[in-house]
Image (cartoon, rainbow, N blue to C red):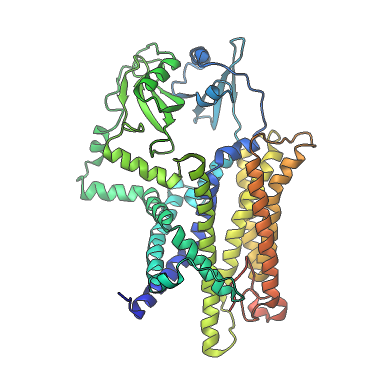
Amino acid sequence: MAIRTDVVRLYRQVHTWTGILTGLILFVCFYAGALTMFKEPLERWITPPVAVTPATLDRAEDLVAAARALRPEVRDFTLAVEPALAGEAPLRLTWTEERFDPAPWAATLAPDGSVAVEQLNPSGIGLLVDFLHRTVGIPGDLDIGTMVTGIASALYVVALVSGVIILLPSLVKDFLILRVTRNVKRMWLDAHNVLGLISLPFHLVIALSAVVFGLHDHIYDTLDRVVYGGQMRAVAAASSPFRTVSKDMGPAGMLPPKEFLTRVHSLAPGFQPVSLEYHDAGTGAATVRVWGHDPRYLVRREGFVLMGAVDGRIIDTQYMPGHQNGWSATVSAFFALHFGTFGGGIVRWSYFLLGLAGAALFYTGNLLWIESRRRTERQARGPVEQSRATRLLAAGTVGVCLGCVAGLSLTIAAGKWLSGLVDDLHAWHWGIYYAVFLGACAWAFLRGASRAGVELLWASAAATAAIPATSLLGLVMPGLWLSDGLIGIDLVAVAGALAFAAMARGAERRAQTGPRDSVWAAPHERSESEVGIQPLAHPAE
């Protein structure tokens, strides 16, 4: 059945304004979200290689005992078993002393049986990209940033639904058509529609789950009043996996770490352990969460089984893959679909590419609105004098989007240069990103969109090219290194740098040859009141 023209017009307005209100926020969330798929490899790319002293899990009990003898006040700690099983790292026990410093501490066991305790200085690049993905980089209270992204995601759902309604009248005729012609605006509109349609299921999953993640406190508060009558905490406590844990805080011995792994293997042979997380170690209430994954099931980033550390009994399996009830399995699947923690490398690369495509979707949406406005006004009364709002939106689009790209690329490349030279590499990562991001935004508003777009695209290309260039210099420069097995990061960066360079060239041509009343036209042939920009390849008539 045909959809009335006035209905399509209404939903086009809804789609336009929800897209404009959320586009820049979601660009940062999606671009950083794409990088979170490889945040562990990025951490390893930045971290200097160390000589590995393999140690079998048979010595894990010695490490736990020796570390607890040195730090008896530490009762909550984690024993990493996956790297040790793979021979990639020595046995390591880590904990956090938040009262003194948020950086983690680690204890490792030497071949002679001695224990070395040190405070770690991780690069923190994974924390940065995860923070940007969750909060769009809003500093301060994490809850404020997640609430902003939650609201943006709710509007994003509206934009998705209205976008599909807009396309319904021409869906059969224009489905997946990409017309590469001199009409650049038509080409970018086709690209925008194709990206949106192909990735619609992905976007719906991400949008709906992000609403829950970002607004969960408000959702829970509402449920507490409306559904549970103020008793939600009591209901949650009754279903907690820790409800049957002993309260005995007297001293007690614990089973060897290897014993927990043996019992978990008997329970679930396909479960692959990653770490043992101890709580209240050395007491009768001690518990161990055996964290791991099972590729056959959709789980949160990792699942776990809760065990008693004293007797090894299975306390709870509601978060363990393959042993969950219907509700827990559904919730876990929701998390897995958002974070892409299933299916191995194929899904990880797919989510990475879909994340980049999503960022492009929001960028092109803003560009299309700017050009559509010019076309409409020109048909009504001749050449357009761009309004201040349009020029500000164009500059903001370029500054925010390309500032995010350049900032992340540069801080990744700088991480390898600064590793081992600064005390707090994490703080340097954040400082470099925000300096570049805010500088790019200021530059865009100062220079105008057409000039800043070209310049910031070249800056993004150079910052991204600095990643593989740093790796190459690691072959010849002392203090740098070529990260074994991580050449994929460098190859992706090369592709990104080439893409940004091609976009910069296209932007330069568009600025010189495009319509003179466009906000993307070169400013030297326009009045001072029309200073504008030209980012990626932009829409034309």
Question: Looking at the image, is 534 positioned above or below residue 305?
Answer: below
Residue, far front: 173
Q: Quadrant of the C terminus?
A: bottom right
Which residue is painted at 54% across and 63% down in the image? 363
Give residue 217's position: percent from left, percent from top. Answer: 34, 47
Between 476 and 410, the one lying in front of the other is 476
Which residue is painted at 70% across and 45% down in the image? 468
Question: Is 431 on the left or on the right of 475, as rendered?
Answer: left
Give residue 106's position: percent from left, percent from top. Answer: 56, 24
Question: Looking at the image, is 133 positioned above or below residue 457?
Answer: above
Confirm whether residue 62 shows in the render: yes
Which residue is painted at 69% across and 77% down in the image? 513
Between 506 and 104, the one lying in front of the other is 506
Confirm whether residue 69 shows in the render: no
Residue, far bottom: 381
> Which quadrant of the view contains residue 537?
bottom right
Which residue is painted at 67% across and 61% down in the image? 457
Give residue 345's position: percent from left, percent from top. Answer: 52, 41
- For the image shown, how many numbered marks are present on the structure? 0
Between 119 and 14, the one lying in front of the other is 14
Question: Is 189 on the left or on the right of 525, as rendered?
Answer: left
Q: Quadrant of the N terminus?
A: bottom left
